[in-house]
Every structure is written in structure tokens, then in C-alpha cells.
Image: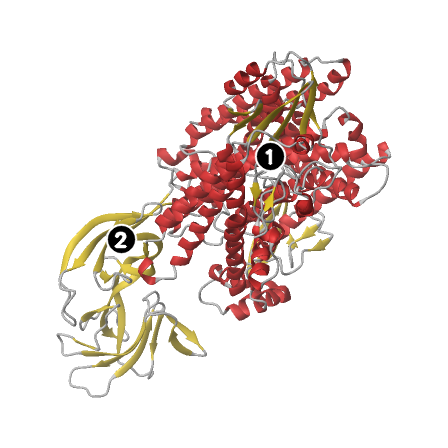
């Protein structure tokens, strides 16, 4: 350490630009803050010795200096900003329909630009490694830049003395000389105290200061940001974060995914309400509803019972369930239980639950040789009917579509069920085969004697719930709150200092603030009232 | 209820004309200062502005009562509210700095916003389930107030640029300043053309395929760009000059392109007629009126607006937004375009503050940044809603 002893006797650390105690420019270090003879002093960090401005030899120094540079920080912000904007040109992968291949979707929908977008990986920009890297670098920059500046600035402001060097006074933006004999310094101090300044005195030199805490605002908000980012990082640890999705049919009790087999949910009912312009309460929306042309949803609600499994330690055993909580999930009001929350995220109306078929003569629909009901989520392999008829389910397509002339199921949910049935009349060993779906009833062999017909069906709604457990929310909220406190602290208060220096023939006055010079001038104006001190000048000259 | 809706609409009209009147008084302050220290015009101007603001508050709350929810739920409601917040922010900064000419520029911007808003459907609309939350008005009003205050930074920056840019020679500065003024002309053209064609009840109906299905598309302005593979159904209507490119698939994509073309062309006509009449750049015409403005003070107003507005914006548009998103959509952040653009706005003003505080960007550079920031805010309001759709596409 090459310490610097100032003419005022104060010993400064290496790299100091302005003496911590008296503010005298340390001659050999003026280049650091770009000060020169003609211009005002750069007061940014009060000329304190910052590591980044002092050492640049080792690799550690170089990395430190890179990340502590505001210029680098602003570039990182700017690159992230541009990248984010590019990420909104076309929809991100998470927003495109789930059943399409992104590789072809972008080309089909948006042409060549879409394909380029996809191939460069912009379709999944916000979880790409380089976007994460940018955010991480901003995080590192925030930490290093803050440490680099906070400690020296804190020490300097702590060590500052009212007695300032002449050069320091003269090179302040607000500076004035008064030549007069009857200067009322006591009045000056009184005025300042009335303006809520803290007044310090040393051999007749006066330092008035207020809102020093505003200087810590940036560091407080940076701490908040770091906590926020760390909270977001914790989501990668499963113990902190569960994000699952379940479909639950009305009347069904299902395991809640992500709860390690501990909780089950019964969907009592799913309700979709729409606005009805005949309802007096909704009549005011008549015009909008008519313009919309279709129904406008009013409520999505799942009434549910959450059960806790009491025998969860026993593998393979039938679960024994105890009611844990009854309640409803609507949008904006998740159903909360234990550490979890269920969010109303999706729904499927009128999914087929059961279908009832009857056997009749091919040519006479009024005959009835027996009926059977198929539970569409759990069909039996054969149905024995009372009259000796037997129906075998040869094939079941819960959500059928024709593909190249062959029936296939595009999902496992009974949205559009279809069957291949083998019908064995009493005593027969050769079945009659037929294909049955909504709007399709095909006689496979062409010489069937009997026919199967749809006698009835039952539908139910399915609710889609997101299961969330999130222990990071507290940390993230804390980060957000600290950030807001820091921003407000730094933006809504300003650190102001006024120095008064006694001279043989009068006084010198100087002032400095980190922002809001207009208000500082008002403070000075009030402070010098009835003191015979002349108003100082603003020496700042705008360059453009 | 219908009566209340009417009262509400009328209050909005009244506030619009009140702001217009106040603008003239602020205009009067240019002369005022030449004569001496008289503050009469400015005082009348700010009084009328406050009356206008209170009237618009009346519009806001009567509409709230009529619809049963805070009227910030569609593009019309949000944009008028944004205009109101801009006026509110102007009033705050006026009382801090007493710069009369700020009113001469801030109020017309607010007027343009309100007029622009009125070009969109104004009927009271019901709330879909995701919007049924108190956070609707907590989040939206705070975000909008933040944007309003940040917009004052643009207004002050614009005054600074017009005052300071050397108009004796062509430069990048003069070009981009003219470009900003041209964009304002485009906005005026859009409002005028929409109003005129709507007063004429102009309509051309097209039949064109949308997502493979034939659909009817109604143009409210004569078609310059018709829908791709479209056929004119309206009798006697002139066909389009050309068809919109095929990749514009959305139902209204071609129609929006058409409206956009009208606005761009209308803006060109407005801008160049003014320029040819005066034989000067538009900024050069205005510049002499701003001689009395103290550029350092305007620079500080611009900066101060960011200092005040940035925390408000962050609180409303990011933090409150995240709390609500967590409740409604089970995640506080989902990279929805509107969210991303709010983040971009945050990044931009964060960069502004770092450049200003740590790298000494003041005056001209700072003013240009303020203009850029307003550009981003308007992009998020207009382009993200009308071009990039997402979860926020209701507004």
C-alpha cells in the first residue's frame, strides 16, 4: 500500500483522488476521474479510492475492473434489452399450440424470417444459455460495481471534515465568494438547521449536510436485485419449487401430481359462466357482448375436496383418504392447502363420460336385444348382455380421427370416442364386426344381421389445474421490496452539502448535491437569507 | 345506468376541450415573458388544466360506477387514463419547476392520446375471469402513472431538443428531430382520417380467407391495401390498389396495414404542407418561440421526471404486475410480450439513470434518451397491442 499523506495531515489509501478529509486533489491521481485544471471537480464518488481505478495488474484485477465498469454494465443492459425485444417478434415456443412441431410451425406461419428465427434459437430465447448468461453477468456486474464503490464512498463520507482545501471549494459547481465584514454565521447555521441540515463546525469552517442516506440508495436497490435473482435461481432446486399440471374429471378423485403421493383431489363440479345480456346485472355490457359475437366467459370455477392420504407409508396398498380441505379454485383465487396451491388453469367442456349402446336388427331400429354402457375412461374388454348376447371391444379410439383411411386416436381423452365392436349373438362363435363413432356406424363385413346403435351418452367437464409449491416467493418478494426501498431512497431524497469557509475579507461558500441542483440552490437561497452572504454562482456550463 | 355512461362520456369531452383551452393559455405565456415578469397566462393555464383534470377524474369514476369495474380494461379506457396521468404528472412537475412552456407541449400530447384512444371501441365491456381482481386497478393505474411521469421526461426532452439543436445546418440531430415531429403528424392524420371516414359511415366489405376459412372483413377506410385473395362485396366500392402480402394472416392484419398506410400518407401530407408553406424545418419554425426557455432547467425537469417516474413505473408495471400474475396465472413472470416490453422499458430507464449519474450524460444525449424511452412506452401501448398479441391483448 502506497498511502498518501495530504498536507492537512490525513493519511489516504492508495488511489485516492480527493483527500478524504479536506478534499484537496491528490495531484498524481487526477487522471483517474478525468479532472483537469480548468474544469470542475468530478465529485462522483467523492474522489474516493476505488479498487477498480487503482489496480490493473493481475487477472483478478482485470476481471474486477471489467465488471465494476458502469460502461460495461450499461452495455450488458443494452444487449439484454435488444435481445428481449427480438424475443417478442414472433411468439415464443411456449405460446405456440402444443400439438405442432416448432421446427415446421415457424416456417409455415412466418415464412423465411420465421425459419431463421427458429434456427437461431430465438423461439426459446428466454431460457437459452446465452440469455441466462447475460442476466448472470448483469448480476455479477451489480455485485462487483457496488462493492467497488460503496466501501470507499462510505469511508470518505465518514472521514470528511468541515475544513476544506481552497481548490476543493473553488472547483465546486456551486461556488461564491463574499467580501464583507458583518457576516452572520450563526444566522446561517440557524437557517440551515431549519432546513433540516446537520451542521458541523471546525475552526469556524462550516459543513452542512443532509440526506446522506440517499447515497446508499443505489447499493440497497442492487442488494434487492441480487436477492431477487438468487430467489429465481432457487427455483431450479426441486425442494423449493413444484410446478405440475393435472386434469381432473367431474366426480373423479385423482392424485395431485407433485405432492409425492400425499394429496388427492376430488372434482365436485366445474362451472363455466358466461355473461348474459338478458340478465339485468350484465345488461350494461349488451353492446360489447353483441359485438363479440360469441359468449364472453365470466367465471371458471372448480369446486373440489382435497384429501390427505393417511396410509402413505404403505406401498401398493389402496390409498386411505381423509378430507383435508374443501373449497373452490377460480381465476385469481387459487385453492391453497398445505404448501401447495391449485390454480384454475384450463378446462374441457362436455367430455364423454359414458356411452350406452343397444343391439337391434339391422333393418328395424325399434327392436331391442339388450343394452350396455361403456365407461369411456375405463372400458371393459367384453360386455355380457342378458339375452345371451356378448359384445367384445376389439378396439377403442378415445379421440379418433381418420388418418390415411385408418382410424387412429390423437389423444387418450374421450373427446371423440370410437369403437370396433365384435358382437357374438347367442350361441355363435363367429362375431359380427362393426365400427362405431359419432356420426359413423360402419358394417365391417357388409353382411351383418344386427346393428349396434347409440342409445344415450353422458358427458362431464374436466378441469385443468396447475399444482404449485413455491418456497422462493418469499425470497423473491423480499428482493423486490428491498429494491423498491433502495430506488425510492436514492431517487426521492438527495444528498446535499454546503460548505462555508471563513476568509480574511469575508467567506467562501460552496455546495454539492448528487442530483437535483435546483433544490440545492433553493436551500442555499434560504440559508443565506439575512446573513450578508452573497448568492453563489452555478459554474456548470452545459456542453451542448 | 345508461345515463351515467352518457354523463361519463360528456365529462370526457368537456375535459378534452378544457385541456385544449389550457394549451392556448400556455401558448400565451410566450408573449407574457417578453413583456416582463407577469405570470397571468401561466396561472390561468394551470388552473384550467386542473379543472380539466378534475373533469376527467369525474369521467373516470362515473364510468367506474356504470361498468362496475375500474375503466382501465381495454385500449380506449387505458389510453384515456394514460392521458389523464400524463396531465397529472405535468401538474406535479409544473408546481415543482413552474416551467410554463411544459404545458404548451405536455397538454397537446395528452390531447393526442385521448383523441387516439377514442378511435377504438368505447363501449363498456365485461371483464373476463383473469381480469376480475383488485390488482386490475392497482397494477394498471400505478403502471400508467409511472408511464405518465416518464412521458413528461420526453416532453421536456423535446423542448430541450427543439431549443438547442442548431437549425442552421443539416445534421443527424435535425433529421431525427424532424422524424419525431413527423410521427406526431402521423398520429394527427390517423385521428383526423378515422374521424372523417367514420362520420361518413364509410364501409367496404371484403370476402377473404382467414386461416383457410372464407370470412367477411369490413374496412372503415377506403382500401389501399386489400386483404390477400380478397373480393370486394360492397357495390360501387373501388377495389384496393394492391393486396396485402400473404403472410399477413390475422383477421385484421390487412385492415390494420391499410389504416397504417393512410396514417403514414396523411402524416406526409400534413408534414410537407407545413414545411413547404414555411420553407423551414418544423423544429426551426418552433425554435424562436422557445428562446426564453432555460435549457439547463428543462434538462433537469426531464431528468427529474425520470427520477420520480422510474420507481413508480417499476412498482406498478413490474412488481404489482408480478403479484397479480402470480395470482391469476400461477407464475409471476411468463415472458408475455407486454411483460417483456415493460422489462425493456425498465432496462432502458435503468440505462438512462446509469448513463446520467455515472457517465455524465446530460443535455442533448439525455434528451435523446428521453425521446427513445417514450418511443418504447408508445410501442408497448400500441404496437404490442395491435401487432404482437399476447395475454394482454384485451388492451
**In the rendered structure, the residue with mark 2 lies on which chain?**
A
Give the labeled residue for mark 1. Answer: A22
- Which residue is more in the foreground, A165 or A494? A165
Check disc 2 and report its element: helix, strand or loop.
Answer: loop
Closer to viewer: mark 2 or mark 1:
1
Place residue A252 in its image quadrant: bottom left
Q: Position of residue B203 (x, y in %)?
A: 64, 43
Residue A339: mark: 2
Q: Residues within 10 Å of mark 2 (few under 14, many from 20)?
A: few
Name the one closer to the observer, B343 or A532: A532
Q: Earlier in the sequence, mark 2 or mark 1?
A: 1
Q: How many marks?
A: 2
Name the chain letter of the residue that bears numbered label 1. Answer: A
Residue at 45% in and 67% down: A99
Tell me if residue A529 comes above or below residue A154 in the rendering. Answer: above
Residue A526: name its quadrant. Answer: top right
Whole-percent x, y for residue B138 in the image:
43, 36
Q: Which image quarter is the C terminus of chain A in?
A: top right
Mark 1 closeness class: few <14, some 14–19, many ≥20 residues within 10 Å = many
Residue B71 location (% of width, % of height): 47, 34
| Direction from residue B390 to residue A297 in the image, left or right | left
User: How far from the left and from the top, in percent, is residue A17?
Assistant: 63, 43
Amino acid at each position: 500500500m502506497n498511502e498518501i499523506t495530504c498536507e492537512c495531515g490525513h493519511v489516504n489509501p492508495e488511489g485516492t483522488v480527493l483527500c478524504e478529509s479536506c478534499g484537496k486533489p491528490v495531484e498524481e491521481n487526477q487522471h483517474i476521474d478525468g479532472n483537469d485544471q480548468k474544469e470542475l471537480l468530478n465529485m462522483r464518488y467523492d474522489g474516493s479510492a476505488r479498487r477498480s481505478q487503482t489496480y490493473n495488474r493481475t487477472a483478478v484485477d482485470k476481471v474486477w475492473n471489467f465488471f465494476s465498469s458502469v460502461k460495461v454494465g450499461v452495455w450488458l443492459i443494452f444487449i439484454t434489452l435488444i435481445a428481449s425485444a427480438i424475443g417478442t417478434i414472433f411468439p415464443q415456443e411456449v405460446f405456440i399450440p402444443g400439438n405442432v412441431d416448432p421446427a415446421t410451425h415457424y416456417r409455415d406461419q412466418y415464412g423465411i424470417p420465421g425459419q431463421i428465427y427458429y434456427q437461431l434459437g430465438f423461439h426459446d430465447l428466454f431460457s437459452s444459455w446465452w440469455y441466462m448468461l447475460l442476466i448472470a453477468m448483469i448480476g455479477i456486474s451489480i455485485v462487483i460495481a457496488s462493492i467497488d464503490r460503496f466501501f470507499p464512498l462510505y469511508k470518505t463520507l465518514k472521514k470528511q471534515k468541515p475544513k476544506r482545501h481552497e481548490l476543493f471549494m473553488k472547483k465546486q459547481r456551486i461556488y461564491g465568494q463574499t467580501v464583507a465584514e458583518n457576516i452572520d454565521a450563526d444566522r446561517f447555521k440557524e437557517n440551515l438547521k431549519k432546513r433540516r441540515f446537520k451542521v458541523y463546525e471546525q475552526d469556524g469552517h462550516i459543513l452542512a449536510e443532509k440526506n446522506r442516506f440517499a447515497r446508499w440508495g443505489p447499493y440497497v436497490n442492487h442488494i434487492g436485485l441480487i436477492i431477487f435473482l438468487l430467489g429465481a435461481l432457487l427455483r431450479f432446486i426441486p425442494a423449493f419449487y413444484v410446478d405440475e399440471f393435472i386434469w381432473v374429471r367431474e366426480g373423479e378423485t385423482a392424485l395431485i401430481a407433485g405432492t409425492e403421493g400425499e394429496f388427492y383431489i376430488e372434482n365436485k363440479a366445474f362451472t363455466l359462466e358466461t355473461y348474459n345480456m338478458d340478465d339485468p346485472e350484465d345488461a350494461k355490457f349488451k353492446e360489447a357482448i353483441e359485438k363479440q359475437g360469441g359468449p364472453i366467459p365470466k367465471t371458471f370455477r372448480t369446486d373440489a375436496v382435497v384429501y390427505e392420504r393417511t396410509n402413505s407409508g404403505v406401498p401398493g396398498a389402496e390409498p386411505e383418504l381423509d378430507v383435508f380441505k374443501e373449497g373452490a379454485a377460480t381465476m385469481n383465487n387459487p385453492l391453497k392447502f398445505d404448501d401447495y396451491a391449485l390454480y384454475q388453469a384450463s378446462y374441457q367442456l362436455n367430455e364423454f363420460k359414458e356411452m350406452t349402446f343397444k343391439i337391434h336388427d339391422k333393418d328395424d331400429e325399434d327392436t331391442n336385444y339388450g343394452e350396455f354402457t361403456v365407461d369411456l375412461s375405463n372400458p371393459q374388454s367384453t360386455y355380457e348382455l342378458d339375452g345371451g348376447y356378448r359384445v367384445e371391444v376389439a378396439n377403442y379410439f378415445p379421440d379418433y380421427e381418420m388418418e390415411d383411411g385408418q382410424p387412429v386416436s390423437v389423444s387418450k381423452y374421450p373427446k371423440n370416442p370410437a369403437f370396433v365392436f365384435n358382437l357374438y349373438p347367442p350361441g355363435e362363435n363367429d362375431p359380427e364386426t362393426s365400427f362405431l363413432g359419432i356420426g359413423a356406424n360402419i358394417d365391417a363385413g357388409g353382411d351383418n344381421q344386427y346393428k349396434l346403435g347409440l342409445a344415450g351418452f353422458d358427458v362431464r367437464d374436466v378441469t385443468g389445474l396447475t399444482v404449485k409449491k413455491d418456497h422462493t416467493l418469499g425470497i423473491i418478494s423480499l428482493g423486490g421490496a428491498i429494491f423498491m426501498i433502495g430506488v425510492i431512497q436514492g431517487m426521492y431524497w438527495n444528498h446535499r452539502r454546503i460548505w462555508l469557509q471563513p476568509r480574511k475579507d469575508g467567506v467562501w461558500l460552496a455546495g454539492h448535491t448528487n442530483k437535483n441542483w435546483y433544490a440545492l440552490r433553493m436551500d442555499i437561497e434560504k440559508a443565506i437569507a439575512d446573513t450578508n452572504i452573497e448568492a453563489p454562482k452555478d459554474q456548470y456550463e452545459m456542453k451542448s | 345506468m345508461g345515463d351515467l355512461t352518457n354523463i361519463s362520456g360528456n365529462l370526457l369531452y368537456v375535459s378534452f376541450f378544457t385541456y385544449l383551452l389550457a394549451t392556448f393559455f400556455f401558448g400565451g405565456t410566450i408573449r407574457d415573458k417578453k413583456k416582463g415578469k407577469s405570470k397571468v397566462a401561466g396561472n390561468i393555464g394551470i388552473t384550467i388544466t386542473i379543472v380539466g383534470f378534475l373533469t376527467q377524474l369525474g369521467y373516470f369514476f362515473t364510468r367506474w360506477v356504470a361498468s362496475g369495474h375500474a375503466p382501465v380494461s381495454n385500449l380506449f379506457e387505458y389510453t384515456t387514463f394514460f392521458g389523464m396521468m400524463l396531465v397529472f404528472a405535468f401538474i406535479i412537475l409544473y408546481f415543482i419547476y413552474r416551467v410554463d412552456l411544459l404545458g404548451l407541449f405536455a397538454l397537446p400530447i395528452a390531447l393526442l392520446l385521448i383523441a387516439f384512444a377514442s378511435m377504438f371501441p368505447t363501449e363498456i365491456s365485461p371483464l373476463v375471469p383473469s381480469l376480475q381482481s383488485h390488482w386490475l386497478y392497482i397494477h394498471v393505474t400505478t403502471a400508467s402513472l409511472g408511464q405518465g411521469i416518464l412521458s413528461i421526461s420526453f416532453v421536456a426532452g423535446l423542448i430541450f431538443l427543439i431549443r438547442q439543436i442548431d437549425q442552421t445546418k443539416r445534421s443527424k440531430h435535425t433529421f431525427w428531430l424532424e422524424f419525431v415531429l413527423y410521427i406526431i403528424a402521423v398520429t394527427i392524420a390517423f385521428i383526423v382520417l378515422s374521424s372523417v371516414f367514420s362520420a361518413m359511415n364509410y364501409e367496404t366489405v371484403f370476402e377473404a380467407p382467414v386461416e383457410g376459412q372464407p370470412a367477411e372483413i369490413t374496412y372503415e377506410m377506403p382500401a389501399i391495401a386489400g386483404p390477400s385473395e380478397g373480393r370486394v362485396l360492397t357495390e360501387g366500392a373501388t377495389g384496393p390498389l394492391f393486396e396485402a402480402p400473404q403472410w399477413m394472416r390475422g383477421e385484421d392484419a390487412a385492415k390494420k396495414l391499410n389504416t397504417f398506410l393512410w396514417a403514414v400518407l396523411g402524416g406526409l401530407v400534413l408534414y410537407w404542407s407545413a414545411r413547404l408553406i414555411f420553407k423551414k424545418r418544423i423544429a426551426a419554425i418552433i425554435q424562436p418561440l422557445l428562446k426564453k426557455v432555460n435549457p439547463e432547467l428543462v434538462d433537469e425537469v426531464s431528468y427529474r421526471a425520470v427520477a420520480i417516474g422510474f420507481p413508480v413505473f417499476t412498482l406498478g408495471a413490474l412488481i404489482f404486475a408480478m403479484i397479480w400474475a402470480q395470482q391469476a396465472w400461477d407464475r409471476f413472470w411468463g415472458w408475455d410480450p407486454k411483460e417483456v416490453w415493460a422489462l425493456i422499458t425498465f432496462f432502458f430507464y435503468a440505462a438512462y439513470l446509469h448513463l446520467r449519474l455515472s457517465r455524465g450524460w446530460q443535455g442533448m444525449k439525455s434528451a435523446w434518451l428521453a425521446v427513445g424511452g417514450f418511443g418504447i412506452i408508445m410501442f408497448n401501448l400500441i404496437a404490442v397491442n395491435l401487432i404482437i398479441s399476447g395475454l394482454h391483448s384485451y388492451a
